[in-house]
Amino acid sequence: MDTTPSPTGATGTLAHPDHADGRHAVVLGGSIAGLLAARVLAGRGDRVTIVDRDEIGPDIRPRRGAPQGHHVHAILAGGQQALEELFPGLTEQLAARGAPVGDMLADAHVVFGGNRLCRTRSGLPLVGASRPLLESTVRERVLAMDGIHLAPPADVVGLRSTTRGIDGVRIVRRLAGSTGEAIDADLVVDTTGRTSRLPSWLEELGGAAPPVEEVRVDIGYATRRYRVPPDVVGGALAVVIGPTPERPRGGVLARLEDDVWMATLYGYAGDHPPLDPTGFEAFAASLEPADLTTALAESTPIDEAVRHRFPANVRRRYEDVRDLPGGLVVMGDALSSFNPVYGQGMAVAALQAVALRRRLSGRDRVGSRTIARAMARTIRAPWELATGADLTIPGVVGRRSRRQRMAARWAARVQTAGTVDPAVARAFVHVTGLVDRPEALIRPSTVRRVMSAA
């Protein structure tokens, strides 16, 4: 047994240092989804232990367990609103730490489906915070709350259960000579990401793994940081160029804290951007319109390009597991992992945290499957948006239904109308920003405007 000092209960199991009375929740994963889950649970009086593989310090840099932190991350407006609900004043705090703040349409060049949306005020925030800055700021707020404990780095290797449900997790701390330990828990929240081992752990306990839905995209993206002259993009904070079926490539150039700009290029179905400077710039030059490549031509790179790959959108339907054990919640990428080019991951995690808080706010005991259904409702719209857009791209592997094809055709008409009608552009980004549901695009007033623009 590892002898590093740690709080230990009478049974020899690792426990929260304040775990004497009341419920103890264990959150698996210390990334954004895990931090938000911990904030919700501690806010209702639970004692919370966060377990992560990484040594998490106060410094602002990408973590080993979150390599995507090296790339552009968007905080969609719906997620930003949810974060403000959980952490009042967070946007101002990020701005004070150097993150530029503007408007999604007024302060960005946005091109979807080859259509440049109107530059108009959308009423939706555009926050230029890097993933490490956002995660560090949220973590600081979370760990300052009473009742939250960050455990030493450890690998979670399984669950413990009784006839009543999950009652703990089994871990091995990341130190030479460590052996297995256990953490008692009244509630376990899995936020370990798309590589979550929860399906196999449930099968080890004699239960069933969840049904899985998958849309394979084989996205590869590369990112390089730049210093950009202030007049190059006309005062905008971001350039967003989405793919088209004819050109399944895209890119984002975003201003972040410390006046650093980050350019992320991506391609579908194995058409991935090169890392060498010449290849990177040639890939950017293939995008239309030329806003991004024009900006890069007048900018100074400050590091080398780095790569990341994303194989598939994955949705695990825990709401369909009939014998889902009590005391178990799944959130974040462990539940649904979206194509990152749409920027939905962090926003959906924030919306799930708000949904969890609302579900747990009543006096009645809430079962795991009830919470799983609530989490599924937060996924439905972003999943339809992401996979619907992906399935218009040749080479993407997934089921193309008649409904999906009709929705894609209407979305293309909305995007075209959004080039000349500011109200349609606003309606579109309110949906893609997860503020309004997709049904908002077929409201009579919006349909009339789209048809008139055509």
Image (cartoon, rainbow, N blue to C red):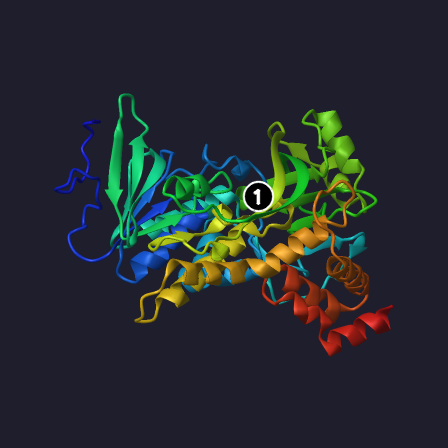
Q: Amino acid at mark 1?
A: Asp
**313 with respect to 139 (left or right):** right
Residue extending furthest toward the top: 176
Left or right of 21 in this view: 182: right
Q: Position of residue 3 (x, y in %)?
A: 18, 27
**Residue 435 falls in image quadrant:** bottom right
Residue nearer the viewer, 179 or 230: 179
Image spot of residue 386 (x, y percent)? 65, 52
Of residues 107 and 33, the one drawn nearer to the viewer in this rendering = 33
Placement of 372 over or under 271, stated as above or below = below
In the displayed orientation, state which residue is furthest to the left.
10
Name the spot of residue 378 as percent of width and height, x first.
53, 61
Label 1: which secondary element? helix
Q: Is residue 30 visible?
A: no
Point out the residue furthest to the front here.
206
- Asked if one can make out residue 188 in the rendered structure from this viewpoint, the answer is yes
* Residue 383 horizontal/vertical position (percent): 61, 55
402 and 292: which is toward the camera? 402
Point out the image quarter for the N terminus: top left
| Residue 273 versus residue 102 in the image, above or below | above
User: Residue at horizontal 53%, vertical 44%?
Assistant: 130
**Residue found farthest to the bottom:** 444
Residue at mark 1? 259
**As drawn, is 187 to the left or to the right of 336?**
left
Q: How many marks?
A: 1
